[in-house]
Amino acid sequence: MEVMTREELGERLRTLRKRRGLTQEALAEAAEVSVDSVRRLENAAFSPSFDTLTKLAKGLNVPKVALITDHYDEEDDLAVMLRALPSPHKEVAVAMLGTLYVQASMTS
């Protein structure tokens, strides 16, 4: 397992944040860190402490490993988001994914 560089961490943080539709300000609030910290991390200006990584992972609702290694992809992210949904929303999401899957398999 290869650990990411600061630049890769910044890009991963930005990608996960945007995938969730969060602004830097919203992530900072959810993670209980400063907006400046989020900005500086995304721009690879410093290396975060373990505490900051933990807070960011919690704010993004991902395991810490998602921020520091390349062994976390869109499928893992989708599973985490799906598990976090309340039951009625989860059922809707699964039905929508099922429909997309059927449509995609018919066009392949």
Image: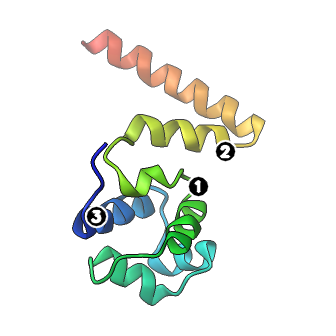
How many numbered discs? 3
Indicate the quadrant where residue 5 lies. bottom left
**Mark 2 or 1, nearer chain start:** 1
Name the amino acid, label 2.
Ala
In this picture, is 30 found above or below 46?
above
- The disc at residue 84 is 2
Q: Distance between the residues labelled 2 and 1?
A: 8 Å
The N terminus lies in which quarter of the figure?
A: top left
Query: Dot 2: few (<14), some (14–19), or many (≥20) neighbours within 10 Å?
Result: few
Indicate the quadrant where residue 3 lies. bottom left
Residue drawn 59% across the image and 65% down it: 59
Name the amino acid, label 3.
Glu
Residue drawn 50% across the image and 55% down it: 64
**Mark 3 or 2, nearer chain start:** 3
Q: Position of residue 79 (x, y in %)?
A: 54, 35
- Front label number (3 vs 2): 3
Q: Is mark 2 on a helix, strand or loop?
A: helix
Q: Is mark 3 on a helix, strand or loop?
A: helix
The C terminus lies in which quarter of the figure?
A: top left
Residue under pointer 3: 11
Residues at discs 2 and 1 in contact (Cβ within 8 Å):
yes
